[in-house]
Image (cartoon, helix red, strand yellow):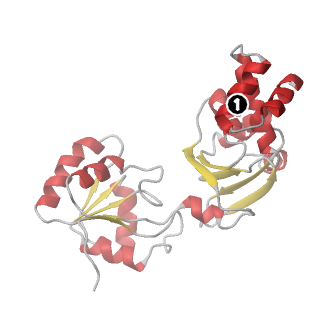
Amino acid sequence: MVREFDFYVVPTPIGNISDITLRAIEVLKSVDLIACEDTRTTQKILNHYDIKTKSISYHKYNERERVEFFLSELKDGKKIALVSDAGTPMICDPGGVIIEELVKNGFSVTSLPGACAVTTFLSQIPRIGEEFTFIGFVPRTESQIKELVQKNISKNLVFYDSPERILKTLAIIKSARGDIKIALGRELSKLFEEVKYGKISEILEHFKDGIKGEIVCMVYADENSQDKELDNKIKELKSKGFRDKEISIILSTLFNLNKNEVYKRSLEL
């Protein structure tokens, strides 16, 4: 016996239309309403799998005004599914507002397993360890990007970016962290899928004539990240006017570091 829920979060294919689960098709056929980012995009999937369920737009510009309507439908006993244009809703896609309200109002919510560009990408690139930081779409300004990659120097940093911006983003990262290793995937699950791994200069050279498609990228953690993180903290405090002795006390207290080692490091910078 399969448990029924009031609200279903349903992943849809990120490229290859065959990458939808049997359960996702069953749910989309059984609910009373499908909330989707773009009804035209979702309709292609519905037509392909002969799903007749009514769909209604639900995107970041109308999230709040749709909430009351959905709550009213659910109170009347209707079942609703949420999909995004591609991948899993709530992962860089709308859904946060309605999920919060559903929980507040006591409705049952479940999420189906399925397509997601992050996991699809990470499962096919060289990686040691499981830890990574996913930030969604990378910030737009150069200063924000530099701050981000420095802050996450000890972690594998995963992000989305547009084909129009990614090469510039990589150049900024190179200027901040040097010619470090990265992995880049584009058009995942589609005909022209491509995943490249190497130094930033090698990736930039490979795509020197341009790049197309949806992008997911990982900046690898620095092998000497602990020393570099400490150096960055010291430099930041120095920029605020703190002296070497003060810096050693602050950092040793906050991060349980050896005060003498911090002091020596600060003197060298």
Viewer-side residue, 205 vs 231: 231
Label 1 element class: helix
Q: Is residue 106 above or below residue 240?
A: below
Q: Is residue 134 above or below residue 255?
A: below
What's the residue at 73%, 41% (across, down)?
170
The location of residue 155, given as percent across then percent down, is 69, 49
Furthest toward the left, the residue is 76
For the N terminus, which image quadrant? bottom left
Furthest toward the bottom, the residue is 1
Q: Relative to residue 56, is residue 226 drawn left or right?
A: right
The location of residue 19, given as percent across then percent down, is 50, 73
Viewer-side residue, 20 vs 254: 254
Tell me which amino acid carries mark 1: Leu
Report if residue 51 is visible in the image: no
What's the residue at 40%, 68% (across, down)?
45
The location of residue 75, given as percent across then percent down, is 12, 59
User: Which of the 4 image quadrants contains residue 33?
Assistant: bottom left
What residue sits right under mark 1 in the picture?
251
Report if residue 97 is visible in the image: yes
Furthest toward the right, the residue is 268
User: Which of the 4 image quadrants contains residue 102?
Assistant: bottom left
Viewer-side residue, 193 vs 268: 268
For the C terminus, which image quadrant? top right
The location of residue 181, given as percent across then percent down, is 80, 50
Label 1 crowd (10 A; few <14 / some 14-19 / many >=20): some
What's the residue at 86%, 23% (across, down)?
267
What's the residue at 59%, 33% (across, down)?
140
Q: Total label count? A: 1
Q: Is residue 240 above or below residue 217?
A: above
Q: Relative to residue 83, is residue 72 drawn left or right?
A: left
